[in-house]
Amino acid sequence: MRAVERAKHARRLDESLLDQVGPFARLTAAERRQILDRAVSSRFEQGAQIFEEGAVADRFYLPLDGYVRVVRQTKDGEQVIMLHIPSGQLIGIAQAFDRDTYPATAVAASECVALAWPVSFWNVLVEDYPGFAGAAMKTIGLRVKEFNERVVEMATLQVEQRIAHMVLRLVNQAGRKSADGIEIAMPVTRQDLSEMTGSTLHTVSRLLSAWEKKGWVKSGRRRIIVREPHQLVLLSEGRS
């Protein structure tokens, strides 16, 4: 897949785009204007690769809408889904980790629009915009925390608990109310869940089918609705 558009808009981007975006929310309108004037806007189709693991990290990105899936390749060539990142969070910030290559691949989990800046602009943001630095480090800390929690879950929890934890995590990241319950707003397949939880496709399918019979969830092609989140909370804690 390819980016639908990868060119700077002919007209200037509106600084209100960054009003409610974490790392930029504390900046003045004039500061946001300066930052946007350095940005390039791109639109990515669902499934399009934004950047690739191991490639030179020449830019970093801010998705303005949609969701991004972060994946890595094992030594055996298998894909492992590491994180799902909602809009409003920076991605591709290799320089923040003192790297010059991307540590993972980013793929558009749904159609999304993203702003991009050259990697050389990262130090400018950190040094010249104090409000940016603190918020950006908080975002990085939360992302590392989530990754560490998943490592602990993989090592200590039963597979049913892991899958319940992951479904609840996706609800927290991308949940929206619907007539049937809380729908995960980004496309999620059973294969995705198996990769994210270190389980098999058969196990994920079996558990989702069992939960659906109990009325806890409703699942379809690339779609999951949680009807009884409390039941999944109890299950994730080993109390069901």
Image (cartoon, rainbow, N blue to C red):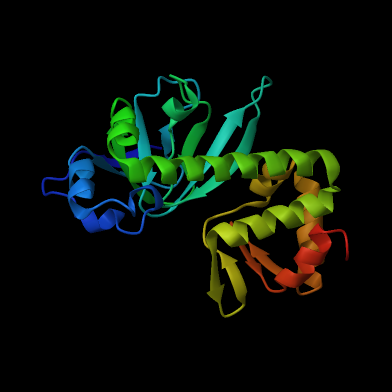
Residue lying at the far left of the rendered structure: 11
Judging depth in this view, the residue of 84 and 35 nearest the camera is 35
Residue lying at the far bottom of the rendered structure: 179
Q: Quadrant of the N terminus?
A: top left
Judging depth in this view, the residue of 197 and 23 nearest the camera is 23
Judging depth in this view, the residue of 20 and 219 nearest the camera is 20
x, y percent for residue 131: 35, 46
x, y percent for residue 165: 73, 55
Can residue 44 be seen in the rendering of this structure?
Answer: no
Looking at the image, residue 118 sits to the left or right of residue 204; the answer is: left
The residue shown at (54%, 38%) is 70
Looking at the image, residue 75 sits to the left or right of residue 126; the answer is: right
The residue shown at (56%, 45%) is 142
x, y percent for residue 159: 83, 48
x, y percent for residue 79: 62, 32
The residue shown at (42%, 54%) is 66
Can residue 160 be seen in the rendering of this structure?
Answer: yes
Q: Quadrant of residue 133?
A: top left
Q: Quadrant of residue 40?
A: top left
